[in-house]
Amino acid sequence: MRFGMPWPGRDVGREAERAGVGAFCAGEFADHDAYLTVAEIVANTEHALAGPAIAYAFARTPYAHATALRQLHAQAPGRLFLGLGSAAFRVNRDWLGVPPERPVGRIAETVGAVRAWLRAENGERVRYSGEFYDIDADVRAPVLGRLDIPVLLAAFNTGMATAAGRTADGVIGHGLFTGSWWNDVVRPSVERGGHDRGSHLLEHGWVITAVDDAAPERAIVDARRMIAFYLTVRTYDPFVAHHGWEQPVARLRAAFRAGDTDAMARAVTDEMLTKIAVCGTTADAKDALARRAGSLPRDVGYFAPPSFLVSARRRAAYALSSLALLDSVPGQE
């Protein structure tokens, strides 16, 4: 597998690539755009893979996703991937103003329509016909040509994981994933979806990582807060039930409603922290990775600093500290 990280900025990113980091990814939110960040990645790196992980699938048309990738490909041929996420129901409805219903079916068609734009040769009509998209584009200018850029889906629960196996080139796992969730839920679902395809399906995934030898307790609290913040979302209830964590999650959600972020962190049990995060001292983090051998994403693992109530400066420090973990990842390229 490759060691990767969310893009930590130009200076840290260049140092990370020199140290052996093999992939950088870009998320997005209300204050940052995935494709603009990927453009920054490819402009400031030489060899590492680069791509959204994830871009909001329904914030753009398939045409817009593909056009951005074509322009980036000119700068970084062979280095790109596209990670798409369906986003939460309320993000689609209230932020993006798009239909939030049936995200699994809609994102499966998004993959097909994006591929139609990416794989069209010059002189071919770009065609895709489905329930959600109907495309018949006659692009006369010679600006196309087939691009085989992998498309991956962010998949947490079984429905989306099955769709990733059936329609995409692989899956992107969430930072909450445990070994049990990968092995018992997500991987079997992806394999069911891809049963008849006969091709290798890629696995990328985030790992909450906070390493600070000078202040390990602060790193642990940051990891606890990040876990708690994620678990305020009911999308993850099947994951909670799978592990039997209903009681601590009820406590952290009550603390979230009360605005008590310290109580949110305290509600995350030691078991939850151990199974989800890599945190504490460098030695602690290396031990955690060794325990999780075989249950990390097979192709690319993004060692992601906590972002909830964590400054950009501290996130950059966590990114630098995580470079000491490069030799802890089995099969690291």
Image: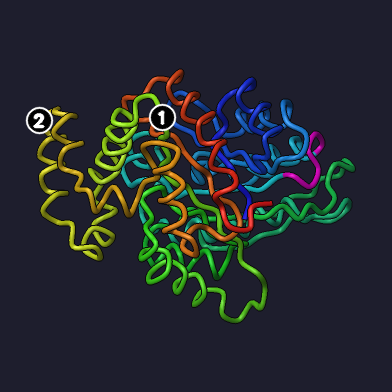
| Image vertical order of residue 290 relative to residue 281, above or below | below
Residue 211 covered by magenta stretch: no
Q: Are marks 2 and 1 in contact (CB under 8 Å)?
A: no
Q: CA distance from mark 2 to mark 1?
A: 32 Å
Count the marks: 2
Q: Are there few (<14), some (14-19), or many (20+) residues within 10 Å of tag 1?
A: some
Nearer the observer, 71 or 116: 71
Residue pictured at 64% horizontal, 77% vertical: 197
The residue indicated by pointer 1 is 213
* Three-letter code for the amino acid on which mark 1 is drawn: Asp
* Three-letter code for the amino acid on which mark 2 is drawn: Ala
Q: Residue furthest front?
A: 283
| Secondary structure found at label 1 | loop
Residue pictured at 42% horizontal, 58% vertical: 291
Residue pictured at 74% horizontal, 50% vertical: 137
Which residues lie in the magenta part? 74-79
On the question of residue 133 being in view, the answer is no
Q: Which mark is residue 258?
A: 2
